[in-house]
Structure formats: C-alpha cells, structure tokens
Image: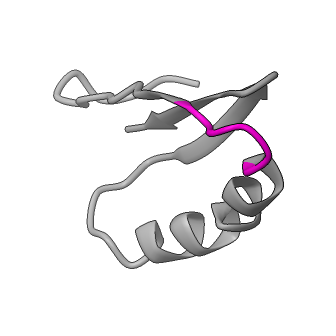
Amino acid sequence: MNYPDNVVTLHPYFKVHAGRLAEFKAAFPKFIERTKAEDGVLFYEFTVNGDEVFCREG
C-alpha cells in the first residue's frame, strides 16, 4: 500500500501482565473503533506474539 510522504507511523510494543492477555485482546475492537473517528488515521491494528502486543498506527 502506498502512503503519502507526510505520514507518521507509531509502533509501540506492550508486554502484557501474566494472565491478562485475553482481557487486553478483548479491548482491541474498542481501540480500533475509536480511531475511526480521528481525522487522518490510515490504519490502526495489533499483532500478538506470546505476551507481547505490537500496535501499528499511521
């Protein structure tokens, strides 16, 4: 996918506390829905690897 030259991307990582991954993942739809109302957001998504969550926002 091609993006404009002035796009800023954020890629924070989160280490989820033991036993709380399901709770953390359950909040993903709320985060994603909230960004839909923000002007200029091209994408907002999560990837999970074990107890680490990687968020991509642009």
Percent x, y of residue 52: 65, 25
**With 57 as the anchor, is 28 left or right in this view?**
right
**Taken as a whole, is the magenta stretch helix, strand or loop?**
loop
- Above or below — where is 33 with respect to 20? below
Residue 41: quarter of image: bottom left
Number of numbered discs = 0
Q: What colouring method underlies this structural image?
A: one colour
Magenta stretch bounds: 15-20
- Above or below — where is 50 with respect to 7? above
**With 56 as the anchor, is 27 left or right in this view?**
right
- Above or below — where is 46 with respect to 53? below
Nearer to us in this view, 11 or 25:
25
Percent x, y of residue 33: 56, 75
Q: Quadrant of the C terminus?
A: top left
**With 52 as the anchor, is 42 left or right in this view?**
left
Q: Which residue is drawn at 49% across and 23% down?
A: 2
Nearer to us in this view, 10 or 18:
18
- Above or below — where is 23 with respect to 14? below
Please identify the residue farthest to the left as the structure is shown: 6
**With 44 as the anchor, is 16 left or right in this view?**
right
Q: Residue at x 71, y 31 (%)?
A: 47
Residue 16 colored in magenta in the image: yes
Q: Which residue is drawn at 46% across and 75% down?
A: 34
Q: Which residue is drawn at 28% across and 57% down?
A: 40
Q: Quadrant of the N terminus?
A: top right
